[in-house]
Image (cartoon, rainbow, N blue to C red):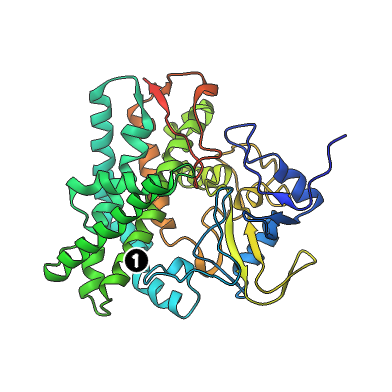
Amino acid sequence: MSMPLPDPMILPSRRGCPFDPPEEYARLREERPMSRLRLPGGRVGWLVTRYEDARAALADPRTSPPLIQVTPATELPLPDDELAVPPGVFSAMDPPEQSRYRRLVSRYFTRKRCREITPRLEQIIDEQLTAMIGHGSPVDLVEWFSQPIPTLVITEMLGIPAGQRSDYQRWIIAMLSLDTEPEPLRVARDGLYGGLAELVRARRLEPGEDILSDLLHGDTPLKDDEVVGIGALLLIAGLETTANMLGLGAFALLQNPAQADALRADEALLDDAVEELLRYLTIVQFGLTRTARADLEIAGQTVRAGETLIVSLAAANRDPQVYPDPDRLDLLRDQAPHLAFGHGIHQCLGAQLARVEMKLAFRALLTRLPGLRLAVPADQVRTAAEDKVFYGVHELPVAW
C-alpha cells in the first residue's frame, strides 16, 4: 500500500528516470489534481497537475505571472511586499503593458522571420559541428554543441559583440542555477544588466542591424531601461531553454536509437519529432507560477485572490487523459498541443525560433554523425533535477 500524499504537498523534484518527471505527479493527477502546496517561506498555494486544468489556469485573465517563479530554492517576498517589475520585463506584466511590449518584440520571432534567418542558423550549426568533429571524439556535446548554438543565435540577434558572448552565457547559467551563492549571483546579475546597459548606450549613439538597435530607433522607440529589460528577458528565456532541450533531446535520441534512425531516414518526421521531444522532456521542470488576482475555481477548488498557483507543465504533458501511453517517447505521435511553451497570452514568445533551432540542430547532428553514441553508461550522465531552473544534462559525453 502506498503512503498517503502529504497535504499540503512539497514541490516534487526528485526523479527516478532521467526523462520522466517526479513520480508524485502521476498520483496527484489521479488522486488530487488540485493539491495544496507548501511554498518556500511557509505560505501555502496550489499545485495544478492535469492538462485541462493547466490550460484553464494559464488562460484565465484572473491569473497573473509574478516577477519571481517558484522553485524549491526560491526566496519568496511576503504577500504585501510584491516586487516591482523592471521596465521591459513584460513576462511579468499584465495587459495592456504586456500587450504593448509583446507586439513590439514578437515581430522578431514570427514564422516568417525564422524562415528568413534559417540560412544563418544552418551556418552556425554547421560551423559548431565542424569544430566539434575537428576536435575529435570523445567530446562533451553540451560544451561543443547544445550550449554554444543558442548562445550564438540569440546574442547575434541582439547585437552582442562576439568577444562578449561567453560572458553573457556564463552570467545566464549562474542566474538560472539554484545552487549559485548570493555573491556570485549578484555578480552575474550586475554583469548581465550592466553589460546590456553599456551596449544599449552604444547602440543609441551608433545603431546596428539588431533587435536592440531596432527597439531604440524603430517606429515606436523605447527608452534605454526598457530595452535593457527586454534584452535581459530574451537572453534568460532564449539561451538556457534551447540549450537544455538540445542536450537532453540528444540524450533521449541516443537512448532510443531506432527512433533516431527513423529521423535519419526521413527528415519529414522532424517537425513532429520536435513537438514530441518538447512534450516528453518538458524542461520547465518546476512549472509556471501564477498569482490569482480575483477568486476563481479550478477543478472544483476555490482559489482565493492573492493565492499562488504552480501550474506543472511536466505533469500536464504526461496526462494519460490527453496522451495515450504518455510516458513513452513516440516521435510519430499524433498528439494534442503540448504545454511545453505555456499557454495563453504569456505563452513563450520565442517558441517558433526554438522549434527551428531544434529541428535544424537535430537534423545536422544525426546526419553528419550517424555513429554518434554515448561515451559513458547512461546512468553516469549527470542531470539537473534539483540544481537548475530548467531541466537538462550538465554534460553529455559522446563518441562517434
Specify few, some or many for label 1: CA neighbours under 10 Å numbering under 14, 14-19, or 20 or more: many
Quarter where residue 39 is shown: bottom right
On the picture, is 158 further left or further right than 98? left
**Residue at image point 31% right, 56% down:** 190
Q: Identify residue for label 1.
A: 229
Residue 364 can be seen in this image: no
Q: Is residue 18 above or below residue 179?
A: above
**Residue at image point 56% right, 51% down:** 71
State the quadrant of the N terminus: top right
Query: Closest to the observer: 370 or 35?
Result: 35
Residue 136: x and y, percent?
Answer: 27, 20
Residue 174: x and y, percent?
Answer: 39, 45
Q: Is residue 68 above or below residue 255?
A: below
Q: For the residue labelled by badge 1, is the local secondary structure a helix, a strand or a loop? A: helix
| Disc 1 residue type (three-letter) | Gly
Residue 65: x and y, percent?
Answer: 54, 67
Furthest residue in direction right, as rendered: 1
On the picture, is 41 further left or further right than 260? right
**Residue at image point 29% right, 71% down:** 225
* Circle count: 1
Residue 179: x and y, percent?
Answer: 48, 41
Residue 86 can be seen in this image: yes
